[in-house]
Structures are given as structure tokens and as C-alpha cells.
Amino acid sequence: MWHTSRRIMLAGARAERTMWVPWLTRCHRTGQWSMFCELLAMLMEHHVPWSQSLRLASDAVGPWPYGKAVHAMAGQVEVGGTLGAAEWSRAGMPAMLGIVLSAESVGSLAGTGERDRLDRIAALHCLARDFHRRAEREADQARIWLPVVMTLVFACSAVALYGTLVM
């Protein structure tokens, strides 16, 4: 899982020049969510404090539009604040991830119980797999449709150019 997610992220890091292509942008963002969930679960497995886990996972994903929001929420959790699913949703996070994270932000890792912590880790792994499958599906869509669209654009441009030159 890690190697494949990493491959999507490396491809996405080079794709910043092509973010104007809708399929690639969506694939890149979904790959980032996959990596964020996987890293967050791994950090939780190793008993890293919750606010620090959020920051480290966000930083490891690289530059992404949700980084500042995750850091702000980690700071809020650090000072004892609680975050509901609505706050995570307003930050632009997927709904299911917001539910898992809001459940975690209610208490500290030590205070929530081992079974509860393990359930959240399993949920994060499941979300990471789901995001990974979505990213692969979106990459497949891009592999199918991008050549078709580009061929049509170039063909129509060539016909239009030829038409203006001949007339």
C-alpha cells in the first residue's frame, strides 16, 4: 500500500504543472488524502501525540491546500479544544475522514481507551485504501479520456486552421 501510494504522490508532485487538467487534479488530491490517512494511522499506531500526528502527517504529504487548516486544527486540539465533524468539513476534508478525526479530537489518545484507538486506526487504514482505490480509478479515467480529448482538440484545431488557410 505504501509503495503504491508513494508512487501516486511522486507522480502528483511532478504534475503541478498539469493541474489545469481536471482528471489529474482530482487524482492528485485523492492520492494526498490516501497518504495523509495512512501516515496518520501509522503515527497513531506508534502512540505519537494526536496534535503532533496531525502536523507530521500533513507535512509529510507535502504542499497541499489543506495543510494550513490541519495545522490550525492541531493547534486547537493542543490547547484543549474539541473539534466536531462540522469543523473538519468546513476545512474541506472528506466527510468520513472528518467523522473519524472529530471522534479522535474529543479526548487524548491515552484517555480514549486502547480499543477505541485501535478502531480509529483501522478506520484510517480503511479510508486510506478507499482513497487509494479512488485515485487509481481517477488515474485510469485520465489514461482513457485525456488522449481522446487531446486528439479531438488537436484535430479540430488542425481542421479549423486548414479551413482558414484554404478560404
Image (tube, rainbow, N blue to C red):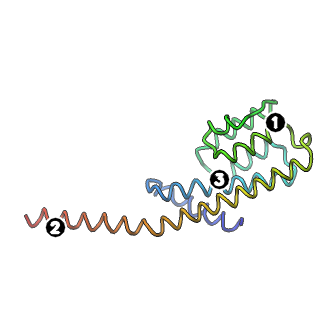
Q: Nearer the viewer, residue 110 or 119?
A: 119
* Quarter placement of the N terminus: bottom right
Residue type pointed to by label 3:
Trp
The quadrant in which residue 100 appears is top right
Q: First in sequence, mark 2 or 3: give its number.
A: 3
The quadrant in which residue 99 appears is top right
Q: Secondary structure at mark 1?
A: loop
Q: First in sequence, mark 3 or 1: give its number.
A: 3
Q: Is residue 56 above or below residue 31?
A: above
Q: Which residue is mark 1?
A: 106
* Number of the label disc, if any, that sits on residue 149: none
At 79% across and 41% down in the image, what residue appears?
A: 103
Q: Which residue is mark 3?
A: 33
Q: Are marks 2 and 3 in contact (CB under 8 Å)?
A: no
Residue type pointed to by label 2:
Tyr
Q: Which residue is mark 2?
A: 162
Q: Position of residue 106 (x, y in %)?
A: 81, 36
Instruction: Judge depth for marks 2 and 1 and give the one in front.
Output: 1
Q: First in sequence, mark 2 or 1: give its number.
A: 1
Q: Are marks 2 and 1 in contact (CB under 8 Å)?
A: no
Instruction: Judge depth for marks 3 and 1 and give the one in front.
Output: 1
The CA distance from mark 2 to mark 3 is 45 Å
Q: Position of residue 65 (x, y in %)?
A: 58, 44
Q: Position of residue 138 (x, y in %)?
A: 54, 62
Q: Position of residue 126 (x, y in %)?
A: 74, 58
